[in-house]
Amino acid sequence: MEQAVAKLCSSLADQCKCYERLWEITRRATGALAMSRGDFSTLLTVMSEKEQLLNTIVQQKQSVAGEIQLWQEQKHSAPEGLVDQLNKSLDMMENVIKRFLTAEKQLEKQISFYRKDPS
């Protein structure tokens, strides 16, 4: 069980790095869109980079599918230290994803604004 939790925590840390990079890219795209006053060409390059990161996240999740299943089956009998370790990683992941989604919403609002702008 300890190895499974260690692998899960490592995978979550790698996924967090991807989400942090996604957040940075999204913020940069939002800034570029504002500075260009609605030039969407910068978003095209950003989209492919974001797609690659999202694919990496999916691959990370798939690589620990067995550990996830093992955890689901045995979490009720896991030592408290392991539960705390995994919960800490999950909390970190939740915060990083929330920050990324907030940036995504801001970018979405900006895209909508410039699409409606007749100039």
Image (cartoon, helix red, strand yellow):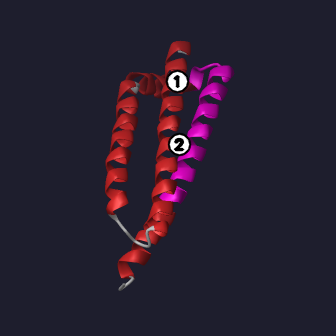
| 2, above or below 47, in the image | above
| 88, above or below 74, in the image | below
Q: Specify the amino acid type for callout 1.
A: Ser
Q: Quadrant of residue 51?
A: top left
**Dot label at residue 109:** none
Q: Quadrant of the C terminus?
A: bottom left
Where in the figure is residue 66, as x and y percent of width and height? Answer: 39, 22
- Check residue 98 for magenta coloring: yes
Q: Residue furthest front?
A: 36
- Say which residue appears at 49% left-offset and 18% top-offset: 4
Alpha-carbon neighbours of circle 1 within 10 Å: few (<14), some, or many (≥20)?
some
SS for callout 1: helix
The span shown in magenta is 76-104
Residue assigned mark 2: 20
| 10, above or below 113, in the image | above
**Dot label at residue 10:** 1
- Say which residue appears at 40% left-offset and 76% top-offset: 114
SS for callout 2: helix
In terms of depth relative to the viewer, which is nearer, 59 or 40?
40
